[in-house]
Image (spheres, helix red, strand yellow):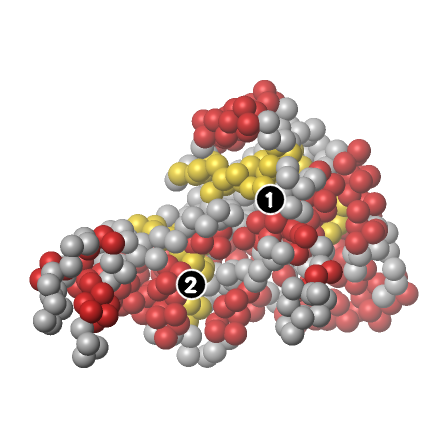
Amino acid sequence: MPRHPRLDPLADRYAARTHGMKTSEIRALFSVVSRPEVVSLAGGMPAVTALPLDAVGSMIGELVSGMGAQTLQYGSGQGDPRLRERICDVMALEGITDASPSEVVVTVGSQQGLDLVTRVFCDPGDVVLAEGPSYVGALGVFQAAEARVRHVPMDDDGLIPEALEQALLECRANGDRVKFLYTVPNYHNPGGVTLSEPRRQAIVDIADRYDLLVIEDNPYGLLGFDREPMRALRARDAQRVVYLGSFSKTFSPGLRVGWVLAPLAVREKLVLATEAQVLCPPSLTQYAVARYLDTQPWREQIKLFTELYRERRDATLESLDALMPPGTTWTRPDGGFYVWLKLPNGLDSKLMQPRAVNAHVAYVPGIGFYADGSGREHMRLSYCYPEPDQIREGVRRLARVIEAELDLHSTFDAVDTGSFRAVGRPVPTHTAETLVGPANSDRSEDPRA
């Protein structure tokens, strides 16, 4: 008999890999953040209204009217050759000057690229090393592949090389098969930190020493506020680093165009996996991105984006500095979309979330960025989408929620459980630590409860 015949008559037929599937913490908030009264500091939605929408609309219209036979037809599984050439120009800004268009595979966003790489390399039970915290979409991919995630800690300078080496040694001692390290080195999602220059070389050296493949996911690398793009890990090692890129943050997330840069042998398998999965990436969106790069001032547009995001980052940090209660700490990003906030001791961002929504402010609980259930004391705040005044109001509401949680905890922590006595009953011999709660315990002993 099916395990849940009334709920789902096919429940006993699903593949084992589906048993752990669940809605991400971000997707679960969609119905909430769409409400106009809620200030959303949750989703990492780019500010596409800053694009020259009239010019982009005309460009796409001209593509269809002038090249409809190509743009509306099937294309290559590897992607449009012209777009792959322009992708190499984009990567050159981060020091990747040796890339060939033949090594590029166009994907439906970098999310599909990560899924393809994982399909190609991971068997069930394999270990993937990933920063702790890590991008929630990556954790979903690894879970679907039935890989095991081992988190490697970070600090304000990004992934800690010594911790990476220790994880590799422990995995080797345990007989675990480590397939790759997954890392977001620039303006980390959700951490907001950037891997320092000395650590970049240290991680590449560790990868070489331990024969470790590195998956470099870099959607935010061109969105630094106060410096030129940092040299990519892929620029340091062309054979050991597979690079994932995306136009979602620098042009349009709705077009869903990303890419993978990989050695030729890997590229061949990625193309086969693409053809099995989606046959080919959408032609129209590829032509649109290629035409945008050919005809629009895209470098100036990226500068406009960074100025806009810098202003919103500043509004976030200034509001946090002014309003957050003692014991709250947070990262100070110099690019990208996110601040990673740590609550005062004892508070739980997941348990606090309904009260925050009731106060009309949304964030993403930290638990969504760990594969092992960690992160409850953290939350991710995104400043890319709201206007600065909305950000200030959202942080004000959030600070009030945190202060109320602290007051609540202070009240219960101050309760002297020894002073509670059941009416007409002797003092129980068990200690407070064995009780679910002193008030509930006494009420259960009181016949008037």
The amino acid sitting under disc 2 is Tyr
Is residue 400 placed above or below 220 in the rendered structure?
A: below
Give 385 or 164, whichever is nearer the viewer.
164
The amino acid sitting under disc 1 is Asp
Q: Distance between the residues labelled 2 and 1?
A: 23 Å
Give 344 or 11, whichever is nearer the viewer.
11
Q: What label sits on residue 217 in the rendered view?
A: 1
Residue 90 percent location from the top left of the image: 66, 45
Report the residue that reaches farthest toward the top.
209
Q: Quadrant of residue 204?
A: top right
N-terminal of the pair, mark 2 or mark 1, is: 1
Name the residue rendered at 58%, 60% in the picture: 22
Which SS class for mark 1? Answer: strand
- Count of numbered marks: 2
Q: Name the residue under label 2.
A: 363
Where, quadrant-wise, is the C terminus in this rendering? bottom left
Q: In which quarter of the image is residue 348?
A: bottom left
